[in-house]
Image: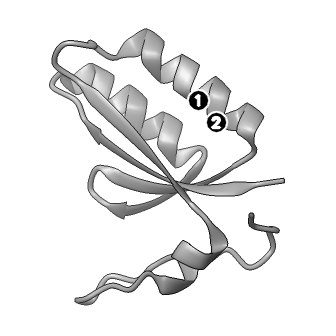
Amino acid sequence: MRHIFLVCYDISDNKTRRYVEKALLNHGVRVQYSVFECMLTLQQLHRLRYSLRQKIDPITDAVHYFHLCKHCKAKRFAQGSGQIHTYKSYELV
């Protein structure tokens, strides 16, 4: 079963930032410059977290993961011209 995770990062090094960005683009869609909405199984989440943990500097960098349940997802909204990506073909928790 797949879950939606909001993943946000603040990375100080350009090379590491590009690595994190590419990894997240492979798993989800960008909703802000350093914020991604990722549709992941728990196994994929664990692999992603492990991969990013190996690359980031734990002193200067941060990656945050927020699980969005189907009720939270339904209550989200946006202001401005940006659009929120929707997943129609996945079962959500």
Q: Amino acid at mark 2?
A: Leu
Counting from the top left corner in percent of width and height, residue 67 is at 54, 53
Counting from the top left corner in percent of width and height, residue 90 is at 79, 68
Q: Quadrant of residue 21?
A: top left
Q: Residues within 10 Å of mark 1 (few under 14, many from 20)?
A: some
Q: Amino acid at mark 1?
A: Leu
Counting from the top left corner in percent of width and height, residue 35 is at 34, 54
Q: Quadrant of residue 60?
A: top left
* Circle number at residue 37: none
Relative to residue 34, is residue 91 drawn left or right?
right
For the residues bearing labels 2 and 1, Cβ distance under 8 angstroms:
yes
Q: Disc 2 versus disc 1: distance between alpha carbons?
A: 5 Å
Asked if 71 appears above or below 77 in the picture, the reply is above
Residue at 74 percent of width and 63 percent of height: 93
Q: Which residue is mark 2?
A: 45
Secondary structure type for disc 1: helix
Residue at 43 percent of width and 81 percent of height: 76
